[in-house]
Amino acid sequence: MRDTIHLVAVYSKTTMRAWFQYRVDAFLKSLAVFLREATGIIVVFFTLLKFDTLGGWNIYEMLFLFSILFLTYGIMIIFFTGLRDFGKTVRDGSFDRFLLRPRGLLFQIIFVNSDWFAALGHGGLGIALFLISAGKAGINWNVQNALYYVFTIAGGVLIQGAIFLFIAVLNIYLLQTDSLKEMLYWNMRKFAGYPISIFHKIIQTLMIYVMPFAFVNYFPAQYLLRKDDMNSYPEIFMYITPIVGIVMYLVAYAFWRFSIRYYKSSGN
Amino acid sequence: MSFIEVSNISKTYKISKRKSGVPGMLANLFVPKYENKEAVKNVSFSIEKGEMVGFVGPNGAGKSTTIKMLSGILYPDTGEINVSGLIPYKQRKEYVSRIGVVFGQKSQLQWDLPVIDSFELLKAIYSIPDDVYKKNLDRYMEMLDMDKFIKQPVRQLSLGQRMRADIAAALLHSPEIVFFDEPTIGVDVVGKDAIRNFIKDLNAEDGVTMIFTTHDMQDIEKTCNRLVIISEGSKIYDGTLDGVRKLHGSSRQLDVYFMNDSEVAEIPDVEIVEVDKRHSQFIFDGKKVHINDLMSHLLGTYNVKDINISEPDIESIIRKIYSREKVAG
Amino acid sequence: MRLSAYYAYAKKQFLSRSAYRFDHLMGILSTCLQFFIFYEIYRTLYGSKESVDGITMSMITTNFVLSLGLSAIFSPNDYFVPGRIWDGSISTELLRPMSFKGRMIAENVGDACFNLIFKFIPVLLIAIFTTGMEKPAGIGNMILFLISAILGYGVLWTISFLVQMTAFWLINIWSLITIKDVFVNVLSGMMIPLWFMPDWMAGVIKFTPFASIYFTPVQIYLGQLSISEIVFKCGVQLFWTVIIYALGNVLWNKGQKKLVVQGG
């Protein structure tokens, strides 16, 4: 165990050092990611200057909804960069190298690399939005709600991590999954910044049951904000984000365990 | 029972047959079609502790697949591999901590960081004790002459330097077996020699078992005494380098230089390679074609300036073995 | 000037695009989704209201279809020059007996033609059948819209050209290109109709080239501008194209000199 912690520390040190090789470029990149992701928020900001509310949500409530999405992604990408890039790892042969080292495979994939640009860009945006909105959205920050917030963030991280893990596993079977990831993850994520109640029923169903982004930010925000549009969903949805995260992650992990044998026997 | 025991391993790849067009794309995605390719067919061999064995064969012959199975990256479809009681692809973690692998085309060093940083990382990955790490590092630094570039980022190294650093990286945890996949590819002549000498010294001093794959017959000639030739997935030769020479020792090569441009007509049982209009090579089996007959034929037919007779080098012998195998297969 | 050579490059680019069909389908899907998100948001915002500040829902829809559609056509290759500086191939390509910039334009036009036929038209058809998009205000407006759209492309292309030129000094300009895209996306009206920008913001935008890209053609299409306004706004489009191109060209000449000094 101590040995493992030591290795994680060395991995992190190495990643950080590689990162600091190009300091100016790194900060510029993080800033670019920050601004790119902020585009949607700037648009919402100007829109709500004109219209006041969107589906009953005011600007601070909207920013709070966005903040959870970005914060969870920022944390998630620190751990799951290796899964995001898993297709490349398999194609360029780096995965063979992981197989040649006396360490767990998923352990190596997770700790070998972290995309700090994305982490800072998304995470920084999430924190900024949280600071702007948390006080003004009318949330009572008592101990219970704060605890709820922490668990729900962890759940949101796991949900998105599980989706990345699942898509990564598909790389073992298919050569190219970039387009698939674009379709399944990024396109669905476009809806996630907004209250899902404003969208068509089909989109809502997809967001709850297929790519469950609704559990990442919409239902948790509902628990803290209690908007009227929550009435059209079962109340239990507000409480199960951590469970959804754990279950999805376990299922994705089982899929991984099952499939990795297939890699070794097929070799790509 | 030998140190490494490989019996009747086979490996068949499924190669996906890709269709074009939008419907084809969807078909590839949901109902992929596969074609089978037998990469390794029923190969067996055994290797003793401390041996040095070179695997040669043309591209796609199956030597890399064999190495991948030996190093635990792939499962064989059938057959068994046993390395001092361990089964590589089943007891992965235990097994790989006892081996080292160098891929000539794929560095395991951190591209943007100094070499030493990669070494420190490997120390943590393999949990190498401080004293062992220090002892090995000092030794390889000297043997491979690394102190000049150990603090430089890998991206600034020459290919030869990078390869030396990669070899040291694969050896830091004192592996019992080391696999080299094309260790000298792209390296200049001086660099190649440094690498070959190091490999030879290490084998002699520590008794590390070493398994190679290479294209460069010089690698084999200068380091190994045992040679395994693989062609089209099958083992076609296993023995000493001299054995190959003896096996095809009756082969001779005649280099003929003409006074003027000459078209050379075919001669039975003789392989003719036209180097240029005024230089042709005649390769033949000394037992089938009598050299006197051939020479008098050539001197009588053409205006010859010079003739040189030699044994074909090992490279051409092996090329001949492959081509014979292809004809037979 | 051998026009046929440039035509060949444009055609090559057009044909090479058809090889990546799946990516292409993804691109259409992505544009459609983006459109439907905006559409649903504004449907919710409008609720039962007929119009806000004289802007009806169908005008909003038209704005999004046209600007997202045009942006799907335009998408100039921002990495044309940076990519060649990065791998060093620019020095040899500059020696070829044809204008490098001409070839760059040719390839981008080839791309744009492909996008027009295989991206814009499908997206347009989907939008027409599923939402209430307005017809052009008149046949004259339609023609002027097309002219203005081409001028808009000029503005967007020169902005891309200008940003790409910085690669002579910075080499890796992913960050700059990304930041440029943020400005274009927000200030051009592609993601938020410029009618609804607060006055102070509208004042700022007036002095930037961004509204010339998509918003001017859209306004012409909807018949919001008088003839004199149309002439003025198209003049503004032309003005920006010339000015930004001239700026880019200064950097282009300096950059080439720098390339020569460094020997590639």
Image (cartoon, rainbow, N blue to C red):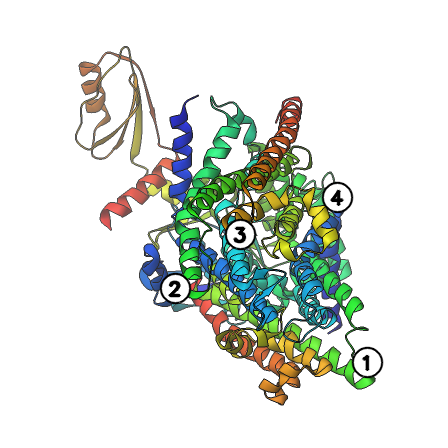
Image position, residue B68 (x, y; %): 47, 59
The numbered disc on residue B151 is 4
Q: For the residue carrying disc 3, how many other residues have a C-alpha within 10 Å: few (<14), some (14-19), or many (20+)?
A: many
Q: CA distance from mark 1 to mark 3?
A: 42 Å
The amino acid sitting under disc 4 is: Lys
The residue indicated by pointer 1 is: A141
The residue indicated by pointer 2 is: B29
Q: For the residue carrying disc 2, how many other residues have a C-alpha within 10 Å: few (<14), some (14-19), or many (20+)?
A: some
The numbered disc on residue A203 is none
Callout 3 and callout 4 share a chain: no
Left or right of residue B213: residue B168? right
Callout 3 and callout 2 share a chain: no
Q: For the residue carrying disc 4, how many other residues have a C-alpha within 10 Å: few (<14), some (14-19), or many (20+)?
A: few
Q: Is residue A222 above or below residue A103?
A: below
Q: Chain of mark 2?
A: B
Residue positioned 52% across, 73% down in the render: A256
- Residue B47 visible in the picture: no
The residue indicated by pointer 3 is: C67
The amino acid sitting under disc 2 is: Leu
| Corner quadrant of residue C79 | top right
Q: What secondary structure is found at the residue carrying circle 4?
A: loop
Q: For the residue carrying disc 1, how many other residues have a C-alpha within 10 Å: few (<14), some (14-19), or many (20+)?
A: few
Residue positioned 45% across, 57% down in the render: C28
Q: What secondary structure is found at the residue carrying circle 2?
A: helix
